[in-house]
Amino acid sequence: MSGTNHDDPRHWSGPLDNMSDDERGWLVDSMRGVSPHINVEQALREHWLEIWYQPKIDLKRRCLAGAEALARIHHPNLGVLLPGQFLPGVDDDTLAMLTEHALLTTLYDWSSFDAAGYNLHLAINVPVSALLRLPIPAIVRECRPQAAHWPGLVVEVTEDQIVRDIKLAQEIANQLKVSGVSVAIDDFGGGYSSLASLRELPFAELKIDHTFVKNCATEGTNGAICQTAIDLAHRFGSVAVAEGIENMADLQALQVMRCDFGQGVLLAPPMPKERFIELLNQRNNRARPQAPAAGEQPADRVA
């Protein structure tokens, strides 16, 4: 389409009409609240578990900076299922098995992205129960990419889990740091962490909960919370990441607030590894994908 900026991060994938049947299925099912009983152990045995990647955009330089690894189950009959459809009720041992699989896959996949010309900082969600059960520092040391320019891994832990035992969280974070793994506090703002507890935890990223990012441009309270979280992250020498960016107004407001990174369906939805690599290859010899600067008008959508 004439006038389309194909390097705009909002074009990492097409609109709903261009989704595969499986992708459309999980989107519709998630909106309907469909929650079929899924045996995660069986999914692991049958190789139904997939790791999808959601790009993370640098809102200052307006380029692709990394990606978050997200678990999906590709069921032979039900299609692609979201974590909310298969994680509830899963015991800690099974959750640890799933986490280990996701961790190993993410470490392995980095080399594929690097081969496409992108040295990406990858992130993975890890529950505290899995951190206690798995020797994650040892796994990373043994299985990490051997490239000298590997930037390390980010482990995302939700705020509500961290505040349960801040001393334990601090000990785990220090162990991870030695192995090239940094910690991100996920869903920040939804828990009850104090400034004192944050001061004791060596976190690298503060991920603002999507409930505050939504309508941060128009709702004063949400905007104030986002600005406070961004300022707080910077004061601690860390970076702020806005989750769940859905519209241009919120994106531009976050850029004005000096938010460092952003994720959300406006920029790019989660996608299978194969699609992500395809898009990286398409852009390997072109200008890096850019997010619109504050005040710019959205480019035409790819038809």
Image: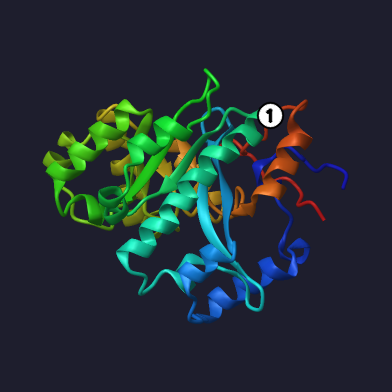
287 left or right of 123? right
Measuring 28% from the left and 42% from the top, which residue is drawn there? 228
In percent of width and height, residue 72 lies at 55, 62
Q: How is the image coloured?
A: rainbow
Look at mark 1 in the image and give the residue it sits on: 115
The x, y position of residue 238, in whole percent, is 32, 31
Q: Quadrant of residue 196?
A: top left
Query: Is residue 219 among the parts visible in the rendering?
Result: no
Q: Which residue is at the front of the view, 107 or 262?
A: 107
User: Label 1 amino acid?
Assistant: Ala
Neighbours of disc 1 within 10 Å: few (<14), some (14-19), many (20+):
few
Q: Which residue is located at x 52 percent, y 81 percent?
A: 34
Give the quadrant of the C terminus. Answer: bottom right
> Most extreme residue toward the top, as rendered?
148
- Residue 276 in the image: state x and y as whole percent: 68, 45
Question: Which residue is found at the position 44% from the left and 35% from the top?
Answer: 153
Q: Residue at x 73, y 45 (%)?
A: 299
- Residue 128 position, x and y percent, is 27, 52
Residue 192 is at least partly visible in this image: yes
Q: Residue furthest right?
A: 2
**Whether residue 38 is situated above or below residue 202 in the rendered picture:** below
33 to 6, vertically: above or below:
below
Numbered circles on residues, count: 1
Q: Nearer the viewer, residue 22 or 6?
A: 22
Of residues 268 and 160, which is closer to you in this image?
Answer: 160
Callout 1: SS: helix
